[in-house]
Amino acid sequence: MTSALTGCAAAEHDGPSAVGSGAPVIVPDTPGGAGRTAAPGELLPSRDWSAVAADVRFAEGMIPHHRQALEMADLAGSRTTTAGVLGMARQIALTQQPEIDVMRDWLRALGRAVPDHGSHAPGAYGMASLEEMNRLRAARGPAFDRLFLELMIRHHEGAMRMAGEELSGGQDQRMRLMAKDVYSGQGIEVARMKEALARL
């Protein structure tokens, strides 16, 4: 995967290249737009082929990671009345679903499959295990608040590690901007959640 992607990026540093008669080439669109198949002989601009393996790993890992955060946040509405926790859950839903949408469309534009819900190993990058998720589902009131905050702090810190890896090794500008947003936004949320946890 690394050689194929970096090969595309490297080849484009010298300027646009024409599509040959080999396998179909998918040309990415803007986030939210559909990709298309390049026509034979079409010149491909370098900005469409800047992705390297680190960018793909970031998107493929962050999608299921965000999905679990959304699942955790969705539980809050029926399990707590604590305004601070409900506000944090709403913020997670507000930011992370649009990020999933962008990364999903970006992967499809590259011709990559979108990861399914079970594609990220429990424990990886702060992911909650099935046992932890079941405990969260069963909890109510203050017990839910504490467990939600503990799990989500760890989860966010894992996302920040993923974002840091993308910023260290990624090249695609959309994925790098996404990583910066994740790193800064979730860093702020971690600080707030730690403050809320200390008050419980």
Image (cartoon, rainbow, N blue to C red):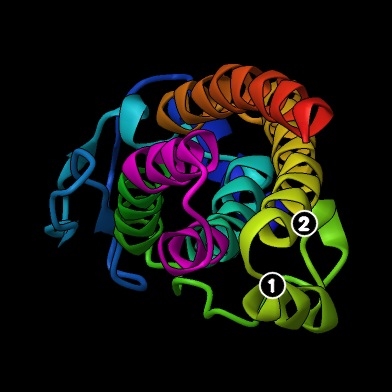
> Which of the two residues, 54 or 160, is positioned nearer the viewer here?
160
Quarter that holds the N terminus: bottom right
Q: Quadrant of residue 167?
A: top right
Give left or right: position of 149 versus 52.
right
Q: How many marks?
A: 2
Q: Quadrant of residue 189?
A: top right
Using the image, tell me which numbered label, if any, was put on residue 139: 1
Q: Position of residue 160 (x, y in %)?
A: 72, 32
Report if residue 54 lies within the magenta region: no
Q: Secondary structure at mark 1?
A: loop
CA separation in Å, label 2 and label 1: 8 Å
Q: Secondary structure at mark 2?
A: helix
Residue placed under numbered mark 2 in the picture: 147
Amino acid at pointer 1: Ala
Q: Earlier in the sequence, mark 2 or mark 1?
A: 1
Give left or right: position of 106 versus 57.
left
Is 180 above or below relative to 59?
above
Quarter that holds the C terminus: top right
Q: Are marks 2 and 1 in contact (CB under 8 Å)?
A: yes
- For the record, the magenta segment spans 72-95
